Image (spheres, grey):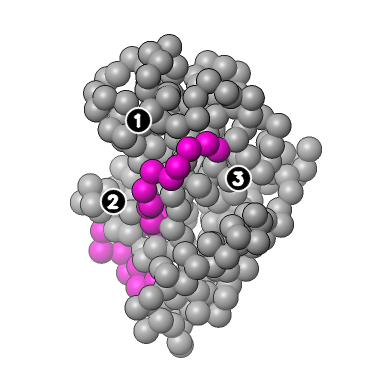
């Protein structure tokens, strides 16, 4: 199974790279430019706080470190909530934000996206001992079952329109400020389901195999990208760096490190 998952990750990375190799080659030198990146740190394995070291780590941190190295720029990070992230980027408060952000047209009206760096599918995250339902239809059939979600996120809208009845005010949806808070509510039994993309879901299951599991079929695919203020001159250099990392296998190596090799400290 692990070999199959790795093959799928590599295939997805290769698929996203189609047509982007033209950006690779001689990369621009930003001359040590200092940039500020916003992050929430609640989305393993893309970004989270390591319980042993207390440091923020993950796929996106490694990717940005490599991008910064290739473009000759200096990076500092600011922690912010998801709700504040897109408005802050739109207002120019930060140079870039990363949070496993799905590339969507409505968001692209407010911020600019990089080229995709990863593709993922949406899955149902439940407690490891869950046996009352095995798919979206089974969850929707019992009105006692509750779902946790962050407002304005892809999982929220998938919960509303693909799992439940299309009512965004449905009382069966319990809203949380962060994805981590929704997962904690799932763990304690306050909700019965949290929808997540396969990236975040695999991260939680890998680090808590006795607590969580993924069930059901995938509910569509989504592409992830970094976000920038509209008109940012960082977009083209970052895209070029992403393309070069895809071409030379760096993105595949990051997938292997964070999805298969990394073991969280207990």
Q: From the viewer's perspective, is residue 19 above or below residue 219? A: below
Residue 60: % across, % down: 54, 56
Task: Give the structural element (helix, strand or loop) at label 2.
Answer: loop
Label 3: which residue? 203
> Which residue is found at the position 43% from the left and 45% from the top?
218
Whether residue 119 is visible here, answered yes or no, is yes
Question: Which one is in front in this view, the residue at disc 3 or the one at disc 1?
Answer: 1
The Cα–Cα distance between marks 2 and 1, rounded to whole angstroms, is 20 Å
> Which residue is found at the position 55% from the left and 38% from the top?
214
Residue situated in front as seen by the camera: 221 or 237: 221
Q: In the figure, is residue 76 to the left or right of 142?
A: right
Residue 149: % across, % down: 42, 29
Label 2: which residue? 104
| Residues drawn in magenta | 214-239
CB under 8 Å between discs 3 and 2: no
> Which residue is found at the position 41% from the left and 81% from the top?
21
Residue situated in front as seen by the camera: 144 or 141: 141
Quarter of the C terminus within the rendering: top right
Task: Give the structural element (helix, strand or loop) at label 1.
Answer: helix
Which comes sooner in the sequence, label 3 or label 2? 2
Task: Give the structural element (helix, strand or loop) at label 3.
Answer: helix
The Cα–Cα distance between marks 3 and 1, rounded to whole angstroms, is 22 Å
The Cα–Cα distance between marks 3 and 2, rounded to whole angstroms, is 23 Å
Q: Residues within 10 Å of mark 1 (few under 14, many from 20)?
A: many
Q: Residue 261 carries which label?
A: none
Residue 237: % across, % down: 40, 74
Q: From the viewer's perspective, is residue 9 above or below residue 181? A: below
Label 1: which residue? 163
Q: Residues within 10 Å of mark 3 (few under 14, many from 20)?
A: many
> Which residue is found at the position 65% from the left and 54% from the top?
1
237 is within the stretch colored magenta: yes
């Amino acid at each position: 199974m692990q070999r199959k998952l790795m093959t799928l990750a590599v295939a997805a990375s290769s698929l996203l790279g189609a047509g982007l190799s033209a950006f690779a080659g001689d990369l621009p030198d930003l001359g040590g430019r200092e940039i500020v990146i916003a992050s929430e740190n609640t989305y393993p394995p893309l970004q989270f706080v390591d319980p042993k070291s207390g440091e923020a780590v993950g796929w996106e941190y490694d990717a940005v470190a490599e991008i910064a190295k290739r473009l000759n720029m200096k990076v500092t990070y600011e922690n912010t909530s998801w709700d504040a992230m897109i408005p802050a980027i739109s207002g120019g408060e930060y140079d870039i934000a990363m949070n496993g952000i799905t590339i969507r047209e409505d968001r692209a009206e407010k911020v600019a996206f990089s080229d995709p760096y990863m593709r993922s599918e949406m899955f149902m995250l439940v407690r490891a001992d869950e046996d009352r339902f095995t798919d979206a239809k089974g969850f929707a059939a019992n009105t006692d079952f509750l779902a946790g979600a962050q407002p304005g996120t892809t999982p929220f809208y998938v919960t509303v329109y693909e799992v439940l009845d299309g009512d965004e005010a449905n009382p069966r949806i319990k809203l949380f400020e962060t994805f981590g808070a929704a997962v904690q509510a799932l763990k304690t039994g306050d909700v019965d389901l949290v929808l997540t993309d396969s990236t975040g879901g695999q991260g939680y299951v890998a680090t808590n195999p006795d607590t969580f599991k993924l069930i059901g079929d995938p509910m569509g695919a989504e592409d992830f990208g970094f976000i920038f203020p509209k008109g940012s001159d960082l977009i083209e250099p970052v895209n070029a760096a992403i393309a070069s990392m895809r071409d030379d296998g760096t993105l595949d190596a990051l997938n292997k490190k964070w999805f298969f090799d990394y073991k969280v400290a207990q």
